[in-house]
Amino acid sequence: MKKLPSLLTTIHVVLEDAEEKQVKKRALQNWLRKLKDAAYKADDMLTECSIEVARLESNAQNVSQLHTWDF
């Protein structure tokens, strides 16, 4: 999970380079579009996972604080 942001950055750099150098072939353009879509989806999923982890950590912290108030 920790390597995913670095991998996504690499994918974005490769995509930018490929777009600059791409030939006007439909197959290459199609492949690049699909790869770009996949990279954006993976990036969105990583963001959602990070948000969920933060939510779960916050909930765990709140539960922990409640236990310190037990009478």
Image: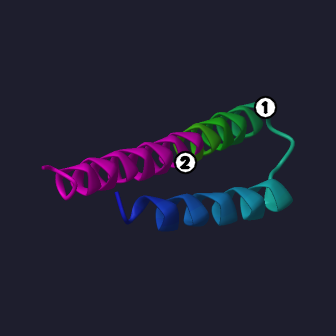
Is residue 53 shown in magenta? yes
Q: Position of residue 68 (x, y in %)?
A: 19, 59
Label 2 SS: helix
Segment tinted magenta in the rendering = 44-71
Q: Is residue 37 above or below residue 71?
A: above
Q: Is residue 50 left or right of residue 40?
A: left
Q: Which residue corresponds to mark 1? A: 26
Q: Residues within 10 Å of mark 2 (few under 14, many from 20)?
A: few
Checking the image for residue 10, the label placed there is none
Q: Judge whether residue 60 is colored magenta.
A: yes
Q: Is residue 29 above or below residue 4?
A: above
Residue, disc 2: 47
Front-lying residue, 49 or 5:
49
**Could you tell me if the residues under marks 2 and 1 are in contact, i.e. CB atoms within 8 Å?**
no
Q: Is residue 28 left or right of residue 68?
A: right
The residue sitting at 59% across, 65% down in the picture is 9
> Position of 33 compared to 9: left or right?
right
What's the colour scheme?
A: rainbow
- When the figure is inspected, residue 47 is found, relative to residue 65, above or below; the finding is above
User: In this rendering, which labeled residue sits more in front, label 2 or label 1?
Assistant: 2
Residue appearing at x 72%, y 36% in the figure: 33
Q: Is residue 16 left or right of residue 65?
A: right
